Amino acid sequence: MKPSRSKLKIGELATGQDLELSLFEFTPEVQTGPSVYIQANVHGAEVQGNAVIYQLMQALESCELRGKVTLVPLANPLGINQKSGEFTLGRFDPITGVNWNREYLDHKLDVASWYQGHRHLSDTELIAHFRALLVERCHSRLHEPWGITTGHRLAVSLQQMGHGADIVLDLHTGPKSCKHLYCPEYDKDAAKYFSIPYTLLIPNEFGGAMDESIFCPWWQLSEYLATQGREIERPVSAFTLELGSQENVDLNDALVDVEGILAYLSKRGVISEHVAPAKMPRYACYLKDYKKYHAPLGGLVEYKAKVGQALPAGRPLANILRVDRYGQESAIVPLSLPVDCVPVLHFASASVYQGTELYKVMTKVFVL
């Protein structure tokens, strides 16, 4: 099956030209499985997700689909075109300074009040009405009479498409990073299917990202229903896949991630084919144990700890070189951490201000 292709207008440039996204859709004649929405490259330099979408589309052409799959590569054309010399910026909206991945709509629903008007519905009807509510709130936001920012318009347009799906995958990369997965705590078994060694388990708290904007409302609904003696299986799953380092495209490595995505889609019944997950060790920690380490002084950084490799407490993390202190003992300042950890990513540049977020590390790591 070949995908259909369409365009979605998400704004207008100062020259009056339309700002558009390319959408690709695989639609089975009869849909019996969950629907899927996948996007990539919300941050300008995080391009590997596009390679994964490309390879995934080739794989899906040979699959027997049970569910509709919508794919949006190059999901932020403004971000990917934010260039400075040879580098892509594109992490923050240049107009507002807001992180492109923190622009999504927080619905702030009064679930209790909503449920009182819908408690007579069957589970299937309840889910359909709640989904329609989320889509409509995005639609209303996009047509806010006072207008909304360029970045918020982009994000809510993407979010509206995501709310129409049962499974949402947001593909990212880090600066210098190993592969890792953001997964809601209630859905941690899903992490065993993706070809990703490290998982961060997220609580039911909206922090502004795409995956949270999708799963948090459903989590809140299911928790409230439980207090009313009504149990429903959460019908929506959403994950952020961090696929390595930014400013890098590797089509062969993309195939590894495609196998993991297909294994999950196979498990969920989106495709008829059986795809077994990769046999590999997988580790996790809770988001509260995912720590940021900030540079204690400015200078030039020699990154010593390798991402994705366990680092015992007290072992070298990095050295900061202060050439201005030449001839003094403090010209090279060794850095280490007081706990065992797994470095997941580090700052892309070798020159840092004091206070720069130097490393992010997993602590209290356990086997998944």
Image (cartoon, grey):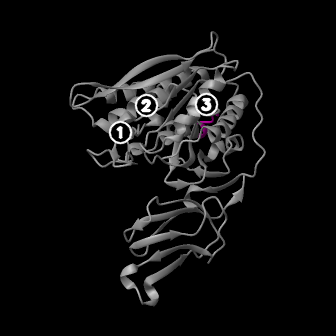
Residue segment shown in magenta: 226-231
Q: Mark 2 points at which residue?
A: 158
Q: Position of residue 330 (x, y in %)?
A: 44, 86
Give the Cα distance between marks 2 and 1: 18 Å
Q: Which of 52 and 227 is in front in this view?
A: 52
In the rendered image, the vertical position of residue 270 relative to residue 303, given as above or below = above
Within 10 angstroms of label 1, few (less than 14), some, or many (20 or more) residues?
few
- The residues tagged by marks 1 and 3 sit, at their Cα atoms, a distance apart of 23 Å
Mark 1 or mark 3: name the one nearer the start of the chain.
3
Query: Which of the labelled discs sits on residue 81, or is there none?
Result: 1
Does residue 81 lie above or below 180 as drawn?
Answer: above
The reply to whether the magenta stretch includes residue 329 is no
Task: Tell me if residue 274 comes above or below residue 302 in the rendering.
Answer: above
The kind of residue on which mark 2 rests is Leu
Q: Which residue is drawn at 60% across and 52% down?
A: 200
Image point (21%, 28%), residue name = 15
Residue wearing tag 3: 55
Which residue is more in the foreground, 219 or 191?
191
